[in-house]
């Protein structure tokens, strides 16, 4: 059974940093693309970043480019999102998602999310 | 960037009624459109992919249609558990991956 368990969300001040984690089980990160999708309170869904199954292709939304870094540890089967220079508009529930295959971008599985709050 | 516009924003219906949700793309996405359901306090769930294919475990009352720029999600007879927010998403022209703004199906 595929499971995605996010962690790391907390309250951080503007300009600060945060690292989110997503522990995956029931499959290996080297088999499918993984993405982070966020949802600001009371708002819709916003794609943040994707890493391919091979780890060689990475994409970011313009809103986070240069500030966020997606990565993974294949031994721990864990996906990460390093978030730097955080802004109030980064406040959101961050979902870890698994695509159906290599970059087909059908978001087949979603974790329950971890809440990052950026506020002074 | 492809913009997806969903309408109506809110749909007020009674259990047993038919729900028709629309998603319009700013340019053709072929049939590479998915629909997700999100209930309060829960993560989104994949319902439909490639415009008309139901995901694993999705009941037959959910169906999708359309191609190019105009798509429809139909719920043939609303069950109490279907009252939720529905999002469309395109995957043909990315990055960025884009979602529609959502349609809330509420109990009338």
Image (spheres, helix red, strand yellow):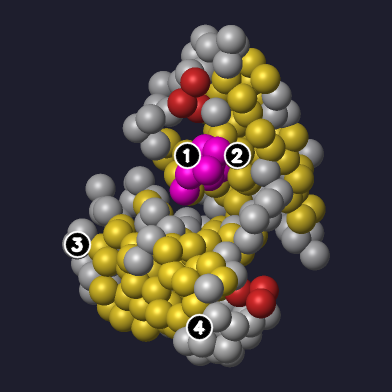
- The reply to whether the C-beta atoms of the residues labelled 2 and 4 are less than 8 Å apart is no
The residue depicted at 47 percent of the width and 86 percent of the height is B18
Relative to residue A70, is residue A53 depicted above or below? below
**Side of B41 relative to B98 (left or right):** right
Q: Which residue is mark 1?
A: A48
In this view, the residue in front, A35 or B99, is B99
Magenta span of residues: A36-44
- The residue carrying pointer 2 sits among few (fewer than 14), some (14 to 19) or many (20 or more) residues within 10 Å by Cα, namely many
Residue at 76% across, 45% down: A5
Identify whether A118 is placed above or below B56.
above
* Secondary structure beneath label 1: strand
Q: Chain of mark 4?
A: B
Q: Is residue B95 left or right of residue B83?
A: left
Q: Please give the residue where the numbered disc 3 appears in the rendered image.
A: B27
Looking at the rendered structure, whether the residues under marks 4 and 3 are on a common chain is answered as yes
Q: Which residue is mark 4?
A: B75
């Amino acid at each position: 059974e595929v499971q995605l368990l996010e962690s790391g969300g907390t309250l951080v001040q503007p300009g600060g940093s945060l690292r989110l984690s997503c522990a995956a089980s029931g499959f290996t990160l080297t088999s499918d693309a993984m993405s982070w999708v966020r949802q600001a309170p009371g708002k819709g869904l916003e794609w943040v970043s994707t890493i391919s199954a091979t780890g060689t292709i990475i994409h970011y939304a313009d809103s986070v480019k240069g500030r966020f870094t997606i990565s993974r540890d294949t031994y721990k089967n864990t996906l990460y999102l390093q978030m730097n220079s955080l802004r109030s508009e980064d406040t959101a529930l961050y979902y870890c998602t698994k695509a159906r295959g290599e970059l087909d971008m059908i978001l087949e599985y979603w974790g329950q999310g971890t809440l990052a709050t950026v506020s002074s | 960037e492809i913009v997806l516009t969903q309408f109506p924003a809110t749909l007020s219906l009674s259990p047993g009624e038919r729900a028709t949700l629309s998603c319009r793309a700013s340019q053709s996405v072929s049939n590479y459109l998915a629909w997700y359901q999100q209930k309060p306090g829960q993560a989104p769930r994949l319902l439909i992919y490639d415009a008309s294919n139901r995901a694993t475990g999705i009941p037959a009352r959910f169906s999708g249609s359309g191609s190019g720029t105009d798509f429809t999600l139909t719920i043939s007879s609303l069950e109490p558990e279907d009252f939720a927010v529905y999002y469309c998403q395109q995957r043909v022209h990315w990055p960025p991956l884009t979602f529609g703004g959502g349609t809330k199906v509420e109990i009338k």
